[in-house]
């Protein structure tokens, strides 16, 4: 089944809002074993909507259109659908009753003649109920292509998609085609390195596909198995996931939708360990991420943002002479901060970061992006120098990620020891 989507709206093509509908629909279809072939976006222009419908209609068995079904003058989708398919635009009594009924329920809406516009639907179509909004959806068949029209409001669209459109199409999809996917979330290597590590894994001829999506500063590896039964797809996917895990080893911080923050939280809780943080260039970003997870009070004791030398000395007990002789951005300062915060908090682990996020402050010896991370633990203290690149924000973000990943790696190794 060749399926395409069309998003309608000026705000989409002017970059004022992000087209979340396209991704939501693609994912929902994929979960049902149906892969989208094509996606288009057009503005609130009747000729453009007509042209897109005709083009997608020629090359698809199914077209899902979202947006432009509202009551205002720039909502042109129903009229364009009628023109593109040679139908008349008629006042649909059921749609009219629905608009009135919903307008009554949504107390803030006043029924005015404008709303009758939402009941003008192409003839010879079937309405798609909208349980939460005034705009009715509808579908029609044109030259062998099913066209579904849904409102643009994401919450309305999603409900109608799951309650009406997907069940209708899944029932008709032949032959049975099952798609199973798994995501491996990776931090550390670059895209080319991951590609190299996973070479030979994808086998499109057998129905096994590999996708790498870079989302700074981490990466999502998607493994997709396609087969004519659930068992076959599962049998194809499981060894591929194992293979990828073996190749990528500790770079994989989670599988599925679990974030690195959630992974770290689970490891702390499993191992009953506690943490204290001393942050300089990240200014509390690591603590913010740790505390964004519910239950973090079970393992996170405290975090200090020690920006000045005086604060490093007063709060963490870092020797003032060391800061002058070795500098605040140095391995010695980082390890003294990690040990100091661990001792002050009485935690199992103390983690510290100090660095130059830029754009000013770099030197030849220590250019912008130089960061030291140190982890003080019961079995030792490790400090490493990094050189990150990017904007101030990117350097701070990757520093926070690297620090979290250090905690994860330490706890994983500790559990395995
Ligand atoms: P309504 O009855 O609410 O007017 P509609 O079908 O006319 O529904 P639009 O006017 O096109 O929908 O869009 C309504 C709102 O829904 C937009 O302002 C926007 O916030 C959101 N929206 C529309 N299309 C999308 C999309 N593709 N992705 C994300 N949000 C969208």
Image (cartoon, grey):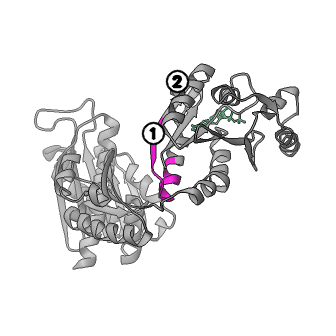
For mark 1, does the 10 Å Cα neighbourhood hold few (<14), some (14 to 19), or many (20 or more) residues? some
Q: Mark 1 falls on what kind of element?
A: strand
Residue 68 lies, in percent from the top left, at 66, 31
- Most distant residue in the bottom direction: 417
Q: How many marks?
A: 2
Q: Earlier in the sequence, mark 1 or mark 2?
A: 2
Residue 246 lies, in percent from the top left, at 21, 68
Quadrant in which ligand 1 is drawn = top right
> For residue 398: magenta?
no
Distance of mark 1 from mark 2, alpha carbons?
A: 20 Å
Above or below residue 336? Residue 140 is: above
Q: Where on the picture, by quarter, is residue 392?
A: top left
| Residue at figure coordinates x 59%, y 54% from the top left | 169
Residue 354 lies, in percent from the top left, at 26, 47
> For residue 36: magenta?
yes
Q: Nearer the viewer, residue 125 or 183?
A: 125
Above or below residue 155? Residue 347 is: below
The numbered mark at residue 38 is 1
**Residue labelled with disc 2:** 14
Q: Give the magenta part as a residue range.
A: 26-39
**Residue 415 visible in the picture:** yes
Q: Nearer the viewer, residue 267 or 14?
A: 14
């Amino acid at each position: 089944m060749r399926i395409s989507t069309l998003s309608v709206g000026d705000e989409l093509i002017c970059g004022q809002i992000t087209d979340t509908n396209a991704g939501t629909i693609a994912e929902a279809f994929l979960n049902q074993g149906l892969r989208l072939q094509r996606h288009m976006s057009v503005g609130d222009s009747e000729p453009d909507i007509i042209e897109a419908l005709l083009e997608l209609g020629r090359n698809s068995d199914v077209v899902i259109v979202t947006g432009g079904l509202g009551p205002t003058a720039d909502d042109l989708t129903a009229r364009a659908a009628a023109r593109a398919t040679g139908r008349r635009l008629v006042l649909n009594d059921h749609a009219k009753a629905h608009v009135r009924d919903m307008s009554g329920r949504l107390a803030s809406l006043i029924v005015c003649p404008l709303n009758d516009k939402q009941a003008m639907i192409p003839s010879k179509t079937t309405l798609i109920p909208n349980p939460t909004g005034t705009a009715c959806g509808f579908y029609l068949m044109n030259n062998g292509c099913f066209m579904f029209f849904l409102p643009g409001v994401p919450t309305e669209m999603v409900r109608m998609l799951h309650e009406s459109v997907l069940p209708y199409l899944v029932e008709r999809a032949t032959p049975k085609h099952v798609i199973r996917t798994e995501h491996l979330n990776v931090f550390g290597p670059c895209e080319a390195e991951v590609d190299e590590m996973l070479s030979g894994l994808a086998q499109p001829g057998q129905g096994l596909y590999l996708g790498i999506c870079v989302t700074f500063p981490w990466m999502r590896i998607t493994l997709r198995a396609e087969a004519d039964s659930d068992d076959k797809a599962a049998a194809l996917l499981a060894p591929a996931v194992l293979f990828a895990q073996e190749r990528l080893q500790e770079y994989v911080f989670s599988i599925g939708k679990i974030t690195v923050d959630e992974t770290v939280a689970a490891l702390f809780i499993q191992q009953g360990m506690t943490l204290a943080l001393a942050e300089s260039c990240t200014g509390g970003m690591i603590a913010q991420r740790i505390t964004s997870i519910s239950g973090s009070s079970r393992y996170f004791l405290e975090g200090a943002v020690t920006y000045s030398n005086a604060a490093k000395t007063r709060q963490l007990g870092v020797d003032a002479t060391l800061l002058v002789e070795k500098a605040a951005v140095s391995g010695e300062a980082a390890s003294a901060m990690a040990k100091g915060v661990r001792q002050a908090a009485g935690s199992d682990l103390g983690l510290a970061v100090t660095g130059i996020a830029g754009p000013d402050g770099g030197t030849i010896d220590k250019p912008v992006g130089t960061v030291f991370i140190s982890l003080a633990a019961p079995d030792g203290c490790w400090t490493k120098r990094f050189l990150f690149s990017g904007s101030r924000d990117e350097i701070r973000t990757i520093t926070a990620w690297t620090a979290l990943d250090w905690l994860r790696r330490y706890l994983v190794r500790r559990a395995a020891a």
